[in-house]
Image: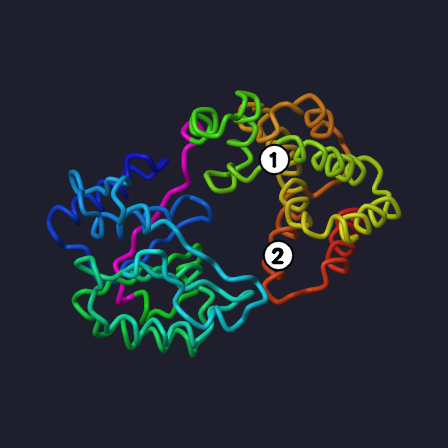
Amino acid sequence: MFRNLVGNEHIKQTLHHLISKSRVPNSLLFAGDEGVGKRRFACELAKAFICVEPSSGEACDVCAACRRADVFAFPKPDDRDAYKRVIFSDHPDIGTVIPYNRNILVDAVRHLESEANFRPYEAPARFFIIDDADKMNDAASNALLKTLEEPPPTTHIFLITSRPDSLLPTIRSRCQMLRFAPVHGEEIERYLIDERAFTHDEARLAARLSRGSIGRAVSINVEKFRVRREKMLAVTANVIEAGDRAALLRISEEMNDAKNKDSFEDNLDTLQSLIHDVWTLRLSGDETRLVNTDLAEELARLAEYHGSVDLPSWLAAIDTMRENFAVNINRKIAADALFVSMASV
């Protein structure tokens, strides 16, 4: 039900209006940052159609159709053939296409094209959700265009993306776009306390770290984050006060060893938040704008250091490094280069 979703009230109002006027487009593009709830909204919109006892344009979440709609059996990561098909929920009129590794396979889009031409089995319409639609290559995108140009009247296709500009202009032009905003920190904090049993301190920290992403907030293990943050704070202090390259390279080695490789990008996010906080304090001294508010005293000390450090260039370098992950760069070499360049400024 839309009322149970956190944030983006303007999207809820838009969807309610479209449902009430029976004007839900055949093709919708759900665009916004990762983790703001785009897929949840798409699923709830589909359920509003398949629900057997809808109320005020919303799914009841109680009937058998609603319960089946939420159940997906996703394939194992190494089962490539399974990603060549639409993955249906337990309800035969709701299916999804998801990426295999970093790409949506053209075979999956062709299967969607075929399935889109079938009439609904039970509901008034069929719904297909394409996750991370920006991961379609040219072949997959062109295959989807065929369906978007002349969609069957009983078929709806919802594209989910955090990078709408990466889609072909011809795809964007055939979809009505819904732009999702980051969720307010107060809403995330309240949700974590009421629904996820976070303590007030944990919820406050997770909400600030989430950058408006409810998905990111829910996934944060605050205890593990604090351990990770302690190491990244040592990196930040080292590079600002000492510029000890040998120590930084040892930390890079540790970040890339087998036991830590899965948390590499989390470490990078943590480092970036600390550097940004130091920069915020250096510019304004406003502690209320910090992410890591519980470290305000230590961060203020680093902000007052009078050495020559270029904090904006560090943040830009981290952003560039993260973008380069899309082309499978060697993370160890990239981390070494990042720390050496930071220590050189």
Residue occupied by mark 2: 320
Q: Nearer the viewer, residue 126 or 134?
A: 126
Residue occupied by mark 1: 221
186 magenta-colored = yes
Q: Give the image location of residue 43, x and y in percent.
A: 32, 50
Q: Tell me the distance, in whole angstroms, between the alpha carbons under discs 2 and 1.
A: 26 Å
Q: Nearer the viewer, residue 187 or 172?
A: 187
Seen at 58% across and 58% down, the residue is 323
Task: Specify few, some or many for label 2: CA neighbours under 10 Å numbering under 14, 14-19, or 20 or more.
Answer: few
Q: Earlier in the sequence, mark 2 or mark 1?
A: 1
Q: Give the image location of residue 176, x and y in percent.
A: 25, 58
Residue 173 vs residue 21: left or right? right
Q: Nearer the viewer, residue 223 or 309?
A: 223
Residue 329 vs residue 112: left or right? right
Q: Which residues are magenta?
A: 173-187
Q: Give the image location of residue 205, x and y in percent.
A: 57, 28
33 shown above or below 306: below
Rendering quarter of residue 13: top left
